[in-house]
Amino acid sequence: MTTKCSRRSFLKASGLVSAGLAITSTLPDKFLLWAEEQGMLKATYTPTFCEMCFWKCGAMAKVINGRVVKLEGNPAHPGARGKLCARGNGGAGLLYDPDRLKTPLINTGARGEGKYKKASWDEALGFAAERLNKIKQQYGPESVALFTHGTPTDHFLPLMWAYGTPNIGMPSFAQCRGPRDVGLELTFGEGIGSPERVDMVNSKVVVLFGSHLGENMHNSQVQDFSEAVGRGAKFVVVDPRFSIAAGKADTWLPIRPSTDMALILAWINIIIKQGLYDREYIGAYANGFKELADAVSEYTPEWAEKETDLPAAKIVEIAILMGKNAPAVCIHPGRHSTWYGDDVQRTRAMGILMALLGSWGRQGGTYIGTKGSFPKGESKPYPEPSKAALNLGNYPFAGGEGVTQVIRTATITDQPYPIKGWFVSGTNLMKSIPNQKETLEAIKKLDLLVAVDVMPFDTVMMADVIFPECTYLERHDALAVGKGKSLTVSLRQPVIEPMYESKPGWWIAKELGKRLGVGDYFPWNTYEEKLKSQCSSWGISYEELKTKGTITIPDTSDPYITATNQPVFKTKSGKIELYSSELKENGFDPVPRYTKHPEPAAGEFRLIYGRSPVHTFSRTTNNPELHELYPENEIWVNASKAREMGLINGNYVSLVNQDGVKSNPIKLKVTERIREDCVYMVHGFGTTSKELKNAYGKGADDQGLITKYAVDPICGGTGMRVNFVRLQKEVKHA
Ligand SMILES: Nc1nc2c(c(=O)[nH]1)N[C@H]1C(S)=C(S)[C@@H](COP(=O)(O)OP(=O)(O)OC[C@H]3O[C@@H](n4cnc5c(=O)[nH]c(N)nc54)[C@H](O)[C@@H]3O)O[C@H]1N2
Ligand SMILES: Nc1nc2c(c(=O)[nH]1)N[C@H]1C(S)=C(S)[C@@H](COP(=O)(O)OP(=O)(O)OC[C@H]3O[C@@H](n4cnc5c(=O)[nH]c(N)nc54)[C@H](O)[C@@H]3O)O[C@H]1N2
Ligand code: SF4
Ligand SMILES: [Mo]
């Protein structure tokens, strides 16, 4: 059996990627696997967890002769259940990517020019520390901001807190799930968690708004989705595009983009008017029903038909379907929710729909997260910043996760106080925050830009000093605590030693901490020492974790509301807030209301974007294995529109947005599977970093075209589907 063959059958069996997309192993891997089969070499397996996206699936790494030849899902891990997605399988492609950052680098040219000299760790750490200390002296520690994503956060957040800044920016909040989390917190007093606590496996009806599962490839969630489809659950997919999920659905609702709120409010109205809501549940757990009923009474199915372009009769039919199958109805609240700027309210509307159906905390709806927890460790208290975090004044509900673009504006304007340094770890700001011109302007103004990364992506290549982190397969990281149905804990441990001169994030944070005078926040010699002591205080065997990779704590699951398992709503009123007095007090609509959004003019299309199942944003675009599967993105254009413009499948076009910004040439995908008023592309392509030999210049960058964004006044999320483009035919592009 060759590897290629076994991978194929594995992928096929997993149902996660089609067999045709199997990853081919490299020649050295093939030889090693052959030698192992012949009994000449022995393989070892090391459990760890994946960082190719943020689902943190448990993985088993197979190593022969010091080389990682294969990654498989850990059967004991709830996010993986023995399978990895294509990106997880392709993790070794990152490890062995020849374009990886290999040594610390110090900029020797103008910022962004890409001229670097190799430096020793001591030199690079000293360079950063000296400048960080200078900013602290001159402006105060608050004038440095941390931008971060993924497990590097576990190391650099404490470092920056110890340094004294409260300014944290996470694109995974303000450009992603911020509005969803805030909307649900305002309604139920808590978010939906990650992995989302959706109980699709037990649902009779599942409703997806966008949420393009199958392209959005969060492993166990896609497994749940497949299982529910196989079991015959009814799927309703609301999407202007016939997504993979729509292809599996009973009902596809090709909604006019930006009008989801109209549909949800009409559904709420119908469910109330027809008495399809769960009276007992609402009576026991919710407040504001009357105010809600009054506020939504104007949203009739006929009105919604005009807004959404969906037939009124169909809207009624689905409302009845949901009502009849409640509470086993899963209204998936989505994840990437920064769409149109009224996104907290859209998520609140979804939450209200869940409440009316009595599905929050009920089988087939959403489940109650484990009540199990681990004791909080003692740590030295962090200094109290003397200036408030930048978010707080602007967005009352933003919380501590950071509104990236507010930090960017402060960097440009020096208001309310200057931001002089950016510390960027595991996030590619040029690709993730809208309006690149502003990002560039802010970066140009900085006194210091530090990057900690594994690859020379666009933002990294503008840094003054670059710290090469080793990949997740070469390091320890913080324990991953899973709060799904049960409490779980997983370990990341090195599968092989760090390659080149790369170092783990924990080491970089500790060493920089020493040089910033905050070394006592890292009072251990190695991270493993810290992990061992944490395990012993949690009553877990570190040795068991090392061999199994993941441990599920027994008797920590009680997922549904029962007489003895009553829900706790941490809202102001202690109830589900159909009417939010908290929003009202802050000058916002207490019940969601419909606002019309601008429509594309003749000849224009709304630009919408999403995921490829084999890539994670920009971060995998250079991965040799994943690049081979999907080297460049395409632009989906409705077939009759393409005909009108004389464009055919495979032509290259450029996209020009309302502000005259033009994209790289991008290949046309002419299809019936999208509405006429929008075009669709996969996010993350069109990198500008020449260091990335596979990805440079391939495909087009959606972010470049997103010059306009609609800020959610409640949480600061940036709605990014508010840009319109025209298509310009290009001569064939290599
Ligand atoms: N393979 C892969 N999987 C991933 C990721 C990845 O990078 N790669 N990223 C992960 C992360 S962090 C996130 S946040 C999620 C994002 O994935 P999701 O949370 O699923 O993102 P959405 O924006 O909801 O979904 C995109 C879909 O929305 C549709 N859409 C566009 N406009 C509208 C509209 O106005 N109304 C409706 N109803 N639909 C619309 C698009 O056609 C597209 O099908 O994916 C996660 N999973
Ligand atoms: N236009 C547009 N904008 C978007 C989106 C979109 O669909 N369209 N999606 C939004 C969403 S949902 C999200 S969550 C955000 C995500 O956006 P980001 O937070 O920027 O996340 P990534 O793109 O994953 O970050 C990529 C960077 O992390 C680096 N990296 C990878 N692994 C490691 C590691 O182990 N250590 C370190 N130190 N670095 C590592 C990569 O090399 C790369 O430079 O973007 C948002 N912005
Ligand atoms: S969903 Fe895929 S990429 Fe994400 S952690 Fe799991 S295996 Fe890795
Ligand atoms: Mo996201």
Image: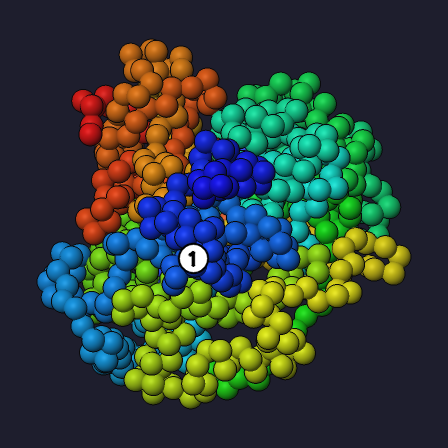
The number of callouts visible is 1
Front position in the image: 590 or 360: 360
Residue 133 x %, y %? 27, 81
Front position in the image: 103 or 329: 103
Q: Is 257 on the left-hand or right-hand side of 486?
A: left
Q: Residue at x 52, y 52 (%)?
A: 72
Q: Is residue 184 above or below residue 7?
A: below
Q: Is 360 on the left-hand or right-hand side of 605?
A: right
Residue 308 x %, y %? 56, 25
Residue 199 x %, y %? 70, 46
Farthest-out residue, left: 109
Residue topped by disc 1? 40
Q: Quadrant of residue 357?
A: top right
Q: Quadrant of residue 3?
A: top left
Q: Residue at x 34, y 46 (%)?
A: 26
Front position in the image: 372 or 580: 372
Q: Residue at x 34, y 34 (%)?
A: 633
Type of residue at label 1?
Met
Front position in the image: 449 or 410: 449
Q: Is 479 on the left-hand or right-hand side of 495?
A: right
Q: Quadrant of the C terminus?
A: top left
Does the image show residue 629?
yes
Model colouring: rainbow
